[in-house]
Image (cartoon, rainbow, N blue to C red):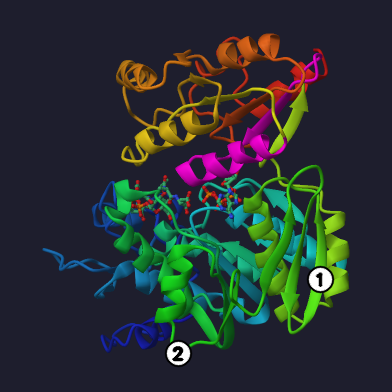
Amino acid sequence: MKLAEIFAILGNRSGGISDLSINGIQSDSRKVKPGDVFVAVNGNVVDGHQYIAEAIEQGAAAVIGQQSLSSRLAIPYIKVDNSREALGKLVSHFYHYPSKKHIMIGITGTNGKTTTSYLIKHIIEKTGRTCGLIGTVENVINEQSFSPSNTTPDAVLLQKLLHESRDEFIILEISSHALNQSRTEGLELDFALFTNLSHDHLDYHHNMENYFSEKKKIFQLLKTTGEAVINYDNEWGKVLSGELTAIPFTLFGKDTEFEIKDVALKGQTSFTIHHNGEAFSIQLPLQGIHNVYNASMAFVTAYKMGIPPHNISAAFRSFPGVPGRFETFYNDKGARFVIDYAHTKDAFEYCLQTAKYQHAKNIYHIFGFRGGRDHTKRKEMVAASAKYSDGIILTLDDLNGEAKEDVILELKKHRASFPKSQVIPDRTIAIQTLWEAAREGDWVFITGKGPEEYKDDYQLGTSGDLDTLKFLKSKEAGT
Ligand SMILES: CC(=O)N[C@H]1[C@@H](OP(=O)(O)OP(=O)(O)OC[C@H]2O[C@@H](n3ccc(=O)[nH]c3=O)[C@H](O)[C@@H]2O)O[C@H](CO)[C@@H](O)[C@@H]1O[C@H](C)C(=O)N[C@@H](C)C(=O)N[C@H](CCC(=O)O)C(=O)O
Ligand SMILES: Nc1ncnc2c1ncn2[C@@H]1O[C@H](COP(=O)(O)OP(=O)(O)OP(=O)(O)O)[C@@H](O)[C@H]1O
């Protein structure tokens, strides 16, 4: 790529050495290689403009930023209004707009993105076609899986993955942070899915209206032929359906063209979707009403793609589940241990209710609070758990910079509001305690992480293992 193309894309007429060749685009000075353009971004932690000198030392051919510099650089400097937007535009151009070559499904919402993504991927693959996945648990490109560092990667990695992918479809989880930080700039979607919105991430967005506004940006990414699918049973989904005027969308839920009926949650989950006078019956190897919504979203999206309903229903039956989402283990007395990624009030309610529907004898719940994140949701998480649980053990979660002693103190304060609770900071000991105590008919929920490892080793200190899933697998196997 020539520098002239960058000038053109950014609408900049600086001219000069515009026939200079560009090898790549980076927003992290540490990754700059000779001939790259370095895009300086005003970050949440540091200001990327501080690293311009380092980028030049590494061989940057040009720099893009949004600040006026006090001294002239030895290489071209292009000033833009918004570096993050410029970054996405340039990288997607650099990789020849890779989202155009795939059928792109973007999914946003507070909960259910990962589960719905796996469901859609499974349905598509059952038709014999290929589907990449970019999300919280893993990125899967050309059937190769690797660990992500964010739910939605930054623009540089995102466009690179899309470029490298030979998958016909790509399903991409899109977080509100990504939309706010223009990580999705330059991306084009065929389907934009909205699962739900509930209290989360207010440390970042401050209030629900801002959070909703960011989520809505997903619809600006739709191709001209693109369409949206919205969960109308969620209050924010209803608001959304009243606001979207310029794009085609399909609703599912009560009083819509895809109605969910006959929901049975005891034993095998089943329900029917009524559409155009037909009823499609679905058996789902997943538990909980939340998964009825996730499966309905997957059904409607697959239907809109033209996949025949009987193929969709058949695909559900062979769905293997999602790592760390309602994953179940049993102790030697027959008590059920469920590992789940729930970390919001809503998710707690959906999970714990499921045990009630299944006539759990006792429901026990082990959880903590993710440090450095939304504190305002903590009280309602405890209240939601207390509503359904016969016993709660509050433990530490990732500290993310919070002082361990402060968190323990806070856990003890919450403990006081629910007499049947205790604080055991070490998560291994908490799990171990219930592994020994729980009897047949009891359900024990361990929430906060799925296969994602805990960051601080004291949480699973006695096992030295940061992965709750592995820990439970070894307990179940008796090793
Ligand atoms: C608060 C937040 O969202 N931060 C994200 C953001 O970082 P940032 O742009 O603010 O970066 P920064 O660290 O301030 O640095 C600014 C710039 O300086 C550059 N830099 C920095 C150091 C250096 O030596 N040289 C250099 O050039 C950086 O590369 C960056 O371009 O952009 C980065 C790249 O996209 C993200 O990795 C990073 O995610 C952090 C790690 C994070 O924890 N984010 C969470 C809150 C998040 O995004 N979560 C959502 C999922 C939420 C959910 O639904 O559950 C997600 O999508 O992952
Ligand atoms: N449709 C839903 N509505 C409410 N809660 C849900 C829904 N689907 C899943 N959950 C709960 O939320 C947890 C996270 O689900 P999932 O990983 O599918 O969502 P996510 O949107 O990808 O989450 P995150 O953004 O935090 O990565 C699940 O483990 C479950 O407890």
Q: Which residue is mark 1?
A: 280
Tell me the distance, in whole angstroms, between the alpha carbons under discs 1 and 2: 30 Å
Give the residue displayed 55% in from the left and 87% down from the top.
248
**Left or right position of 431 against 71:** right
Depth order, front residue of 227/80: 227
Whether residue 344 appears in magenta in the rendering, the answer is: yes
Q: Which region shows up in magenta?
A: 331-358
Residue 241, image x, y percentages: 47, 78
User: CB of residue at label 2: within 8 Å of ligand 2?
Assistant: no
Residue 215 lies in the magenta stretch: no
Asked whether mark 1 and ligand 2 are closer than 8 Å, the reply comes as no
From the viewer's side, name the closer residue of 458 and 160.
Answer: 458
Give the percent coordinates (x, y) of residue 386.
Answer: 47, 29
Location of the C terminus by quadrant is: top right
Question: Measured from the top left, where is residue 368 in percent x and y?
Answer: 46, 27
Q: Secondary structure at mark 1?
A: strand
Q: Look at label 1 and name its amino acid.
A: Phe
Provide the residue designation for mark 2.
Answer: 246
In the image, taking residue 119 as reference, residue 210 lies left or right, namely: left
Residue drawn at x 52%, y 81% as measured from the top left: 222
Q: Secondary structure at mark 2?
A: loop
Task: Tell me where residue 26 sits by quadrant.
Answer: bottom left
What residue is rendered at 37% in x and 64% in y?
Answer: 212
